[in-house]
């Protein structure tokens, strides 16, 4: 599915093979001891993600339609192509060929020429898109199949693209599993790096009959909050309460073999302290802490954020002491109460 329906930091999605549009998933083999489980309150996990997505998400034009033709065009264009180019190209393409009948009747050379002039990658994708449109018209009376299996009968439409169209046009797709979703599941729920495990976790998480909003939401999460270098608090990740990586500070993933240098570092949290104090003024430690980390424990005097430990006042006071030494923050103690504000 396109980065417009989620996507990664590069603003493009995993491509299906340029030859026939289909790609087999890499096979994975589970090893003994790869036990994992979703949180007990899985309904709360689902609700949190959907609410986060519906409150604010990237607004791509193909997200505002359930027209299968328009969605198919966006999916094919977005295969390893930057979305900045896709947005304009998608609009231009629909101006030229506004529906599947228009595209089916077009000269193939014109379609391929459009693809080349808009730098959309492999010309075979234009060829197969044109052939798929002809199939829809000649074999399906101009109506797209509504299921992933039916859509895969179209030329150049592999399992990934078929599931995208079934999800976003007909709300009949399966749970998406791509590089971004694997990263999310691996970090959030400690799902092992195994294709069967990822498929099982993704399927169990997706609410029945909600593939449109769910697949959009989980891909959005991977695209704006759980990128290779994640932005957990800045993006307001809705799964921080349950997230294994957020708890442990280990943000490696199948496509991130080494720990990202910034997320979870003292430098990052120092920056958050400055931003929060700049917005709210003077705050007591237990007022400031939850604004810095969602898992801050108010009243926890000895929480220093060590391995397996909690993030409490000792951890926060250490950050503030560093900032005080640097002349950025002033600390004030009144009995047992410690407050902080930006240095003036």
Image: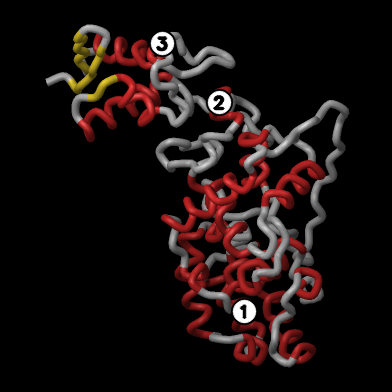
- Label disc, if present, on residue 247 of the rendered structure: 2
Q: Residues within 10 Å of mark 2 (few under 14, many from 20)?
A: many
- Label disc, if present, on residue 201 of the rendered structure: none
Q: Which of the pair 138/213 is nearer the observer?
A: 213
On screen, residue 185 above or below 252: below
Left or right of 27 in this view: 270: left
Q: Which of the pair 282/140 is nearer the observer?
A: 282
- The residue positioned 54% from the left and 40% from the top of the image is 239
- Label disc, if present, on residue 69 of the rendered structure: 1
Residue 152, x across and y down, in percent? 79, 71
- The residue positioned 53% from the left and 60% from the top of the image is 4
**Tag 3 secondary structure:** loop
- Label disc, if present, on residue 301 of the rendered structure: 3
Q: Is residue 302 visible?
A: yes
| Image quarter hosting the N terminus | bottom right
**Tag 1 secondary structure:** helix
Q: Is residue 123 visible?
A: no
On screen, residue 198 above or below 65: above
Distance Cα–Cα, label 2 vs label 3: 18 Å
């Amino acid at each position: 599915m396109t980065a417009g329906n989620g996507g990664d930091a590069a603003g493009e999605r995993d491509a299906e093979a340029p030859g026939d549009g289909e790609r087999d998933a890499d096979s994975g083999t589970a090893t003994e001891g790869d036990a994992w489980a979703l949180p007990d309150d899985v309904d709360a996990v689902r609700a949190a993600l959907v609410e986060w997505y519906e409150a604010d998400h990237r607004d791509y034009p193909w997200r505002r339609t359930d027209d299968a033709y328009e969605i198919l065009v966006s999916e094919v264009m977005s295969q390893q192509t930057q979305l900045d180019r896709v947005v304009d190209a998608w609009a231009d393409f629909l101006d030229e060929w506004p529906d599947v009948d228009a595209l089916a009747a077009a000269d193939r050379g014109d379609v391929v020429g459009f693809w080349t002039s808009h730098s959309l990658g492999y010309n075979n994708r234009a060829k197969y898109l044109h052939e798929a449109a002809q199939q829809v018209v000649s074999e399906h009376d101009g109506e797209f199949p509504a299921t992933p299996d039916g859509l895969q009968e179209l030329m150049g439409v592999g399992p990934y693209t078929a599931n995208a169209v079934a999800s976003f046009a007909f709300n009949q797709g399966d749970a998406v599993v791509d590089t971004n979703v694997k990263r999310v599941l691996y970090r959030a729920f400690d799902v092992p790096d195994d294709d069967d495990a990822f498929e099982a976790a993704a399927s169990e998480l997706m609410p029945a009959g909600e593939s449109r909003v769910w697949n959009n939401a989980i891909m959005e999460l991977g695209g704006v909050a759980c990128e290779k270098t994640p932005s957990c608090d800045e993006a307001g990740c809705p799964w921080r309460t349950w997230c294994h990586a957020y708890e442990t500070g280990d943000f490696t993933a199948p496509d991130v073999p080494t720990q990202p240098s910034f997320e979870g570092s003292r430098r990052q949290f120092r920056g958050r302290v400055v931003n929060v104090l700049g917005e709210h003024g003077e705050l007591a430690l237990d007022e400031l802490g939850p604004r810095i980390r969602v898992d801050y424990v108010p009243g926890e005097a000895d929480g220093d954020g060590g391995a397996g430990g909690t993030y409490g006042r000792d951890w926060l006071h250490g950050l503030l002491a560093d900032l005080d030494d640097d002349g950025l923050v002033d600390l004030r103690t009144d009995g047992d109460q410690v407050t902080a504000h930006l240095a003036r």
